[in-house]
Image (tube, rainbow, N blue to C red):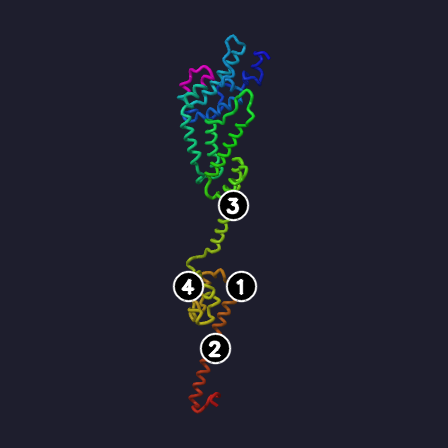
Amino acid sequence: MEHSDQTFNPASPFYLHPRENPGLTLITQVLNENNYSSWSRAMRRALVSKNKVKFIDGSIKRPQKSDDTYDAWERCNVMILSWMTKTLSPHIAESVIYVEEAKELWDELKERFSKGDYFKISNLLQDIHSIKQGERGVSQFFTDLKILWEELESLRPIPVCTCEIPCSCDLSKVSLKYREMEHVIYFLKGLNDSYNTVKTQILLMDPLPNVNRVFSLIIQQERQEKQSNTETRILVNMAERNNQWKPDQSWRNQGRANGIRGQGRGRGRNPNYGKQCSYCNKMNHTVDECYSKHEYPPWYKKEDKKSDWNTVNAYQNNNQNNNDSESTLKTQHQTNNSCNPNLFTPEQM
């Protein structure tokens, strides 16, 4: 294919879509003094998606002005410079305004802001070893920990074989396996103590599952605990509602023996025997313990209210009639005795 045709080939790095312009924002992250690692990773991905990463990694060098591809290279170079400059903070953008090549800008930013990576690596390792779940949910804790892992990975990537004839020892795969095992251990180590049982079960697995599988198991455990806590709270609320009564009711601390069933059945059982209520005018209780005024206790059967009151009143009337009969007989007996002083009783006969 001729060089002049590369600008029309969508698969060529020199191709520019008609909608691509210098004001296009590839990423939302803005570069500052503290986020070069994440910014460079995001920018590199964006340039790969645009098929323009070869302009910053040195794969496509600046051609001579007499070359047929020079015009196409210059258009792409200026476009990439504009995209990168748009994601820089204002004071950083002012310091690189005279840079002419995209690769030169990329290298300068790397040299300026990637220094001190050892301090950054030290801080990341300290954070990874000391991070705890605390009040966060499992999902939020895993996300925060994964951000630290990825940032450390960008600063300290696992080496890969660069030999012309690839090695057959799979050293990179072994290193990746060890890194995955570290992630599982750090994640389990940072969880709260409520997950100790499931943590022990996972660590006893052979082989150890990957970190995503472990996260899935912990999420299931968290969901089960939340469901159990919800059911417990529902039961507690139901029990509280069933036991909630007015504190000023005197029958709240009394047993059934002191209830209406025990009123009027004997002088020894009811201390209010013979007293009349000033509210309902019924006997053998006072206004402080009147169920007609203070509501009936929960153990009292509503269908027995009327019958019990009738029983009590009937009992009271019975006692009253018996007392009246006894008084009449006693009066007559005293009269007879006074009239017949020598009269003997049947027992005496």
Can you see residue 254? Answer: yes
Amino acid under label 2? Asn
Question: How many neighbours does mark 4 have within 10 angstroms: few (below 14), some (14-19), or many (20 or more)?
Answer: some
* Distance from the alpha carbon under mark 1 to that under mark 2: 29 Å
The tag earlier along the polypeptide, 2 or 3, is 3
Local secondary structure at mark 2: helix
The tag earlier along the polypeptide, 3 or 1, is 3
Figure disc tally: 4
Nearer to me, 41 or 85: 41
The tag earlier along the polypeptide, 4 or 2, is 4
Residue at 53% x, 35% y is 210
Local secondary structure at mark 3: helix
Q: Position of residue 61 (x, y in %)?
A: 50, 14
Marker disc for residue 183 = none
* Distance from the alpha carbon under mark 1 to that under mark 4: 23 Å
Disc 1 target residue: 303
Q: Which residues are magenta?
A: 93-105
Amino acid under label 1? Glu
Residue at 45% x, 17% y is 104
Marker disc for residue 288 = 4
Outermost residue on the front side: it is 169
Disc 3 target residue: 227
Task: Name the quarter where the N terminus is drawn.
Answer: top right
Asked whether disc 1 touches disc 2, contact meaning CB atoms under 8 Å apart, the reply is: no
**Is 324 situated above or below 291?**
below
Asked whether disc 1 touches disc 4, contact meaning CB atoms under 8 Å apart, the reply is: no
Marker disc for residue 322 = 2
